[in-house]
Image: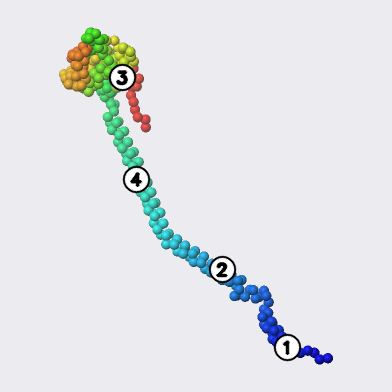
Amino acid sequence: MTQPSRSPAASMDLLASIQRNALEPDYRRARPGGEAGRRPALRVVGIALATGLLAMAAAQTSRSAPSAQAERTELLDRVRSAQVRQEESVARIASLDADVRRLQEENLVSSHDGDQTEGIVTGRVTVTGPGIVLDLDDALSATDGAQPARVTDQDLRRLVNGLWLSGAEAIAVNGHRITARTAIRQAGSAITVDYRSLNHPYRVEAIGDPRQLGSRLAAAPAGHWWNFLKDNYGLAYQVTTAEDLTLPADPGLGVSKARVDR
């Protein structure tokens, strides 16, 4: 029996199929021209870009490092300078404090005469010497049916301050020694000195040069005020000199000496 002959075209189709399918499907998908072949290339490009950015950042950091170091050095220099100035100021203050203490010690009264002078100023000791006496009193009568004018604590304080300004060395009111700690106040109708009531008339004694003390008081605002009260309100105001006055010590003065604790 005779076999049918094959067509030459069929043989060509077989050869063409073998040529087309010469590679395995997996190998064909992984060839460089495919999608999987492009991924390694993209990774390489990404790594290169990241490396470039890191290199640029490192270069920028290396360029800014000297500037930051210079600023830090400048700040440290300023801090050290401020510390030096502070130490110098502290030393200067300590030196000035020492000078003040030395001058205070030099001026403190250590001898008997000096202690006596200090006692006169503070009212701690009895004082004897010449001076002036001022006699004050309320008005005996008043015009226009008003009440007679009275001496007030303000009038008395003004007179005492005027005596200090005129050069008085020691003052007493009705036998009560006046010091820097003395309070002259009004309590109802009475005037109190260190909370002790006084009865009018009032006698103010001041130790000092009688002529200078009297003339200075007359020219001072306190003297003018009391002359005004005398002429316009009828208050009694008389100034006389005295060759020998004795003013007692302040009985309420509890502090005999003050000192600075070191």
The answer for how far apart the CA atoms under marks 3 and 2 are is 99 Å
Residue depicted at x 39% and y 55%:
71
The answer for how far apart the CA atoms under marks 2 and 1 are is 52 Å
Residue extending farthest bottom = 2
Label 4: state its secondary structure: helix
Quarter-of-image position of residue 115: top left
Q: Earlier in the sequence, mark 3 or mark 2?
A: 2
Q: Closest to the observer: 128 or 237?
A: 237
Q: Earlier in the sequence, mark 1 or mark 3?
A: 1
Residue type of the residue flagged with mark 3: Thr
The residue at which mark 3 appears reads as: 182
Report the disc number at residue 43: 2
Residue type of the residue flagged with mark 2: Arg
The residue at which mark 4 appears reads as: 85
Eye-nearest disc, 2 or 1: 1
Question: Does residue 227 appear to the left or right of 177 in the view shown?
Answer: left
Residue depicted at x 31% and y 19%:
182
The quadrant of the image that shows the N terminus is bottom right
- Residue 65 image position (x, y, % from top left): 43, 59
The residue at which mark 1 appears reads as: 7
Residue type of the residue flagged with mark 1: Ser
Quarter-of-image position of residue 8: bottom right
Q: Earlier in the sequence, mark 3 or mark 4?
A: 4
Label 1: state its secondary structure: loop
Label 3: state its secondary structure: loop
Q: Evaluate if marks 1 and 3 touch, with contact meaning CB atoms under 8 Å apart.
A: no
Label 2: state its secondary structure: helix
The image shows residue 18, relative to residue 143, as above or below, that is: below
Eye-nearest disc, 2 or 4: 2
Q: Closest to the observer: 55 or 88?
A: 55
The answer for how far apart the CA atoms under marks 3 and 4 are is 46 Å
